[in-house]
Image (tube, rainbow, N blue to C red):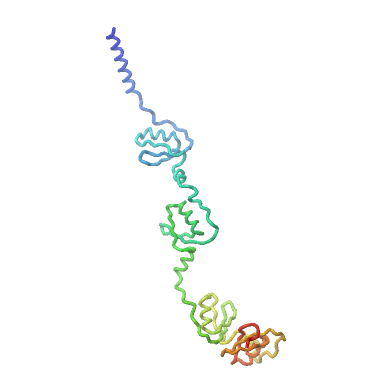
C-alpha cells in the first residue's frame, strides 16, 4: 500500500515537472493600443529611448531582457532633456537698451544681438551654436570697417593765416573757409559734402560783387546791426551792418573784410 502511494506521488511529481517544461514562455507580442502616450526610458547602460506608450516599452523589455529599460519620464526624451535645463536659466529678462554685439558661432557664422544679455539667452537655448563676441557693434558695421581703407587723418594743423576761399558743395551750398587748409580738413571730415573752391574770397564778398557786375551797391537799409569785421592783416573794423561791409568790400576788393562777430568791435 505504501509502495503504491510512493509510486503515485512520484508519477504526479514527474507529470508536474513535464507540464512546467512544456508551458510556453511569456508572450512578448502583446497587442498595444495605438494611442500615443510617449514615455522616456533608460537602459542599464544609460541609453535613453522613446516608446510610443508603456505597453510598447513592456514588449521591448520582454524581447530584449538584457536592456532592462526603466521609465524616467512620461514624455518624449527630447522634452525630458530640455526640461532638465532650468527654464529660468535661458529666459533671463534682458534690458531693452540697444547695445549691439557681433558674435561668431563655431561654424563661422556671424550674428548680431541687441545686447550681450540676448546673446547669453540665445546660447543657453542653442548650446550647439556657441556664439562668442567678436565686436561691440553691429556685424554690418564690423564688415564695413574691415572693407573700408584706413581713413586719413583729418586733423591737419592749419596755419593761422587768413586767405579766404569760397567753396561750393555738390548740393549747391556755398561756404566760406578761412584758408584752403581749413577747407581740406572740412572735406576730410565730411566726405559727402565735397566742397570745391569757386573763388579765392569770402562767399559774402563774391555775392555782393556778382550782384552788380558793373557797379557796387550804393545804399543799404538804415538798420543798425553792427558787425565786427577782420581784414587779412588782422585789423578789426566795425560796420553799421553787413550790407555796409559788403559795399565796402565790393568797392575795395583788395582789402576784403570778413565779419567775425555780430556787434561792434571792442577797439
- Which of the two residues, 84 or 250, is positioned nearer the viewer here? 84
Is 65 above or below relative to 227? above
The residue sitting at 31% across, 17% down in the picture is 13
Q: At 66% across and 91% down in the image, what residue appears?
A: 216
Q: Residue furthest right?
A: 222
Asked which quadrant contains residue 21, the reply is top left
Residue at 47% x, 63% y is 136
Residue that sits furthest to the top in the current view = 1
Q: 260 left or right of 100? A: right
Please give the name of the residue rendered at 54% of the width and 84% of the height, measured from the top-left corner.
Answer: 179
Compared across the picture, whether 234 is left or right of 25 comes to right
User: Residue 251, image x and y in percent?
Assistant: 64, 92
Compared to residue 132, the image places residue 226 above or below, namely: below
Image mark count:
0
The picture places residue 39, in percent across and down from the top left corner, at 45, 38
Q: Is residue 70 left or right of residue 250?
A: left
Vertical relation: 72 (above or below) 19: below
Residue 225, percent from left and from top:
68, 84
In the image shown, does 6 or 236 lie closer to the viewer?
A: 236
The N terminus appears in which quarter of the rendering?
top left
Amino acid at each position: 500500500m505504501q509502495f503504491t502511494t510512493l509510486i503515485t506521488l512520484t508519477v504526479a511529481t514527474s507529470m508536474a515537472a513535464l507540464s512546467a517544461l512544456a508551458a510556453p514562455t511569456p508572450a512578448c507580442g502583446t497587442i498595444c493600443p495605438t494611442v500615443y502616450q510617449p514615455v522616456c526610458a533608460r537602459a542599464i547602460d544609460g541609453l535613453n529611448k522613446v516608446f510610443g506608450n508603456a505597453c510598447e516599452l513592456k514588449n521591448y523589455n520582454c524581447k530584449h531582457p538584457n536592456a532592462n529599460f526603466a521609465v524616467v519620464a512620461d514624455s518624449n526624451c527630447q522634452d525630458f532633456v530640455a526640461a532638465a535645463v532650468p527654464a529660468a536659466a535661458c529666459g533671463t529678462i534682458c534690458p531693452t537698451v540697444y547695445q549691439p554685439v557681433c558674435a561668431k558661432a563655431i561654424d563661422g557664422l556671424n550674428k548680431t544681438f541687441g545686447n550681450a544679455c540676448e546673446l547669453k539667452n540665445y546660447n543657453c537655448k542653442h548650446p550647439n551654436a556657441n556664439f562668442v563676441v567678436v565686436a561691440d557693434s553691429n556685424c554690418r558695421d564690423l564688415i564695413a570697417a574691415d572693407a573700408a581703407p584706413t581713413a586719413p587723418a583729418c586733423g591737419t594743423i592749419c596755419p593761422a593765416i587768413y586767405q579766404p576761399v569760397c567753396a561750393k558743395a555738390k548740393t549747391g551750398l556755398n561756404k566760406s573757409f578761412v584758408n584752403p587748409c581749413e577747407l581740406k580738413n572740412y572735406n576730410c571730415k565730411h566726405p559727402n559734402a565735397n566742397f570745391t573752391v569757386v573763388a579765392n574770397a569770402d562767399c559774402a564778398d563774391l555775392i555782393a560783387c556778382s550782384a552788380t557786375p558793373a557797379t557796387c551797391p550804393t545804399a543799404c537799409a538804415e538798420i543798425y546791426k553792427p558787425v565786427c569785421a577782420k581784414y587779412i592783416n588782422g585789423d578789426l573794423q566795425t560796420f553799421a551792418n553787413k550790407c555796409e561791409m559788403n559795399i565796402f568790400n565790393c568797392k575795395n576788393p583788395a582789402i576784403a573784410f570778413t565779419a567775425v562777430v555780430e556787434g561792434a568791435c571792442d577797439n
